[in-house]
Amino acid sequence: QKEVEQDPGPLSVPEGAIVSLNCTYSNSAFQYFMWYRQYSRKGPELLMYTYSSGNKEDGRFTAQVDKSSKYISLFIRDSQPSDSATYLCAMNYGGSQGNLIFGKGTKLSVKP
Amino acid sequence: EADIYQTPRYLVIGTGKKITLECSQTMGHDKMYWYQQDPGMELHLIHYSYGVNSTEKGDLSSESTVSRIRTEHFPLTLESARPSHTSQYLCASSRPSGSAETQYFGPGTRLLVL
């Protein structure tokens, strides 16, 4: 079983839709959870990170972590064509302990 | 936008050639990484460094080598390239963010070995 599972999609939605992206993981020791966005032909860029369980909101983006279910989500409200990218979840134990473990990424396309 | 640079962006070479992929960052980050990314697959860590003169192998076995002589520079070398090395190589550096490490990525080098 992979440590981090993420549906690769592709996911296609109309502009303005609410998008839900998800990852599951198997290692209960993970403490920090991140979402990266990767545009085509570019390196990933950090969108948000969350410590332990709970929600974090930043503009149109909300990250949720449910450690009891080992499940994390990224919600995008009022999606825009510029949100079309691959979204990667990543997680680690925190601090200098352990490197990031990435999901495969979900390719999102927002149609005008 | 993160100040981390990779050259070349694209490289097509023949089998058996020696190549060096360059990575530089101007943020003064101590920790740096090399990842390999194939289409539809996870980023796989192949090398990382905690600082000058420190290098470690990552989770994915790789025939490449790295060096860290200066804080800002973390080149990756393939002594004899093979078609199986065809991939995208991403360099990253990190700074602590609270107790998390926030990694910043370069634009990547797409390598094609014929």
Image (cartoon, coloured by chain):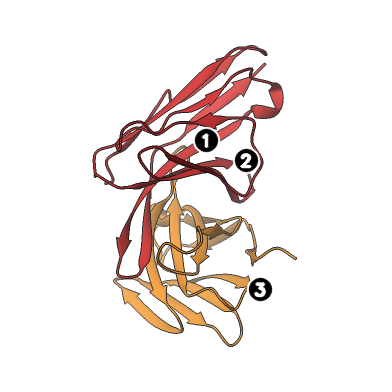
Chain colours: A orange, B red
The answer for how far apart the CA atoms under marks 1 and 2 are is 9 Å
Q: From the viewer's perspective, is the residue at label 2 or at label 3 nearer?
A: 3
Write down the residue under mark 3. Answer: A26
> Helix, strand, or loop for circle 1?
strand
The image quarter containing residue B14 is: top right
Q: Where is residue A21 in the image (x, y as percent from the top left)?
A: 53, 68
Residues packed near mark 1 inside 10 Å, few (<14), some (14 to 19) or many (20 plus): many
Q: Residue furthest bottom?
A: A68
The numbered disc on residue B38 is 2
Please name whichever residue, A95 or B27, is drawn nearer the observer in this view of the structure: A95
> Helix, strand, or loop for circle 3?
loop
Q: Which residue is drawn at 69% across and 21% down?
A: B82
* Residue A33 to residue B53: above or below: below
The answer to which of marks 1 and 2 sits earlier in the sequence is 2
Label 3 sits on what residue type?
Ser
Label 1 sits on what residue type?
Tyr
The answer to whether A86 appears left or right of A47 in the picture is right
The answer for how far apart the CA atoms under marks 2 and 3 are is 23 Å
Q: From where the camera sits, is residue B49 visible?
A: yes
